Amino acid sequence: MGDTQRLNPDEQIRFAREAYENGTDFTLAVEEEFAVLDPENLSLTNRFEELQTAARGTLLEEHLVGELIASEVEVRTGRCESFAEAAAKIGEQRVQLEELARGLGIALAAVGTHPWSPWQEQRIIDTPHYRRNDELLRYVVWRNNTFGLHVHVGIKGADRAVAVCNGLRNYLPELLAVSASSTFVEGIFTHLHSARTEIFTRMFPRCGVPDAYAGWPGYEEYVRFLYGTGSITEHTQIWWSVRPHLAFPTVEIRICDAQPDLEEARSLAALCYALTARIARALDEGEPLPDFPHRLIEENFWRATRYGLSGELIDLASGDVRPARAHLERLIEWIAPVAEELGAEQYLAVPAANSAERQIAQHADGATMKEIYAGLVRRGEPVRG
């Protein structure tokens, strides 16, 4: 769709609305963020540019990008027309990235946080986008050594895209709970299931659970307010956990921690994809959708951050408190017919234990932080010493 960063705000907003009106339902793209590691000690290492250079002329060249710090790399599937295509690409690109990294003597990990590497030692990559964010946010952006999984789902219609985001707000805690993978950071066991959420979502402005908007005009008014007051200089500085994207006619889900396990990454992407499509179908068919106040969703958001799938979430309609797994099971049951239609149902599952739970169980059994992290590294060598 071109470089929308070169458009002025009026052009960008107009371009985005036109793109949504001419968009295609239920296309898909997945973005995975990986830590770049020294294979000997598994600490973060500032070698992104070497990966970028090595990717030139390979299948990854157009899909490998920088993401804030030089000890991080992001791989994007690009637009996929079906979930089967996206699932295949996620696997293929992981293999391609691992082979590229291995040739450079680099290890990789897809976990929400690095357990011990100091944020003070990570270098911001030198691009106009990240220089602007560094100048704007300073300490807030320096601390953001976190890794996530993002899912873009194509939605036709600007008002409809905003309405889908409104619907997705209610289910962000379930998506966070199942994806939680970050319990260690700064050399400590945080007792959180998603420390990434506290570091990123609670420190960045315009982040976390967004407000609900009455169609595109309401959302556009807010974006214009941010530009007009100098609060943002580019649309990507709206860092919500779910947002209508202004460069692509997609709804982007951004709440999820990175996933060490390939099949769990596919399952999480399938859940985000099918849930988005199910909400769109409900809107089309006039099926009532919940519209809970921000303050109530935030209660479940905290529970998911702290306890993940091991805890309880509130049924915001009844006030009952139920296991998070029961919420997830009910959600999967609701979206299953659409998931089957879109070829994603076979990937949906409630894990016996997600990454955070497995890490916490290993810690309780006496494993060290380095031993636990070593088991999550992609093609990493054993930690020495």
Image (tube, rainbow, N blue to C red):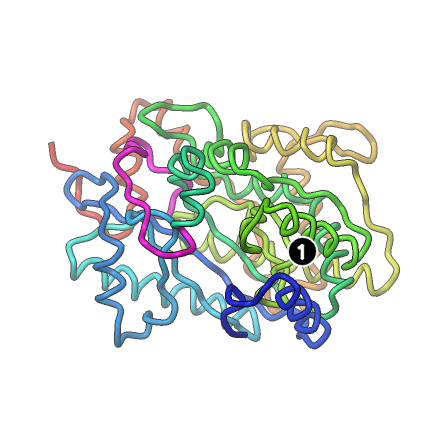
Q: Is residue 324 above or below residue 214?
A: above
Residue 255 in the image: state x and y as whole percent: 56, 45
- Horizontal side of 211 relative to 177 (left or right) equals right
Residue 376 in the image: state x and y as whole percent: 32, 43
Residue 100 in the image: state x and y as whole percent: 23, 63
Total labels drawn: 1
| 7, 273: nearer the viewer | 7
For the point 59% across and 28% down, which residue is it? 311
Dot 1 amino acid type? Leu
Q: Residues within 10 Å of mark 1 (few under 14, many from 20)?
A: many
Residue 122 falls inside the magenta stretch: yes
For the point 34% across and 37% down, which residue is it? 114
| 245, 345: nearer the viewer | 245
For the point 24% across and 60% down, which residue is it? 51
Instruction: Report the magenta residues as a range.
Output: 109-130
Image quadrant in which you'd find residue 174: top right
Figure quadrant of the N terminus: bottom right
For the point 25% across and 33% down, which residue is it? 371
Name the outermost residue toward the front: 229
- Horizontal side of 201 relative to 109 (left or right) equals right
Asked whether the viewer can see residue 154, the reply is: no
Residue 314 falls inside the magenta stretch: no
Q: Mark 1 — residue?
A: 275
- Horizontal side of 140 relative to 372 (left or right) equals right
Q: Is residue 379 above or below residue 301?
A: below
Q: Is residue 198 above or below residue 50?
A: above
Residue 32 in the image: state x and y as whole percent: 43, 55
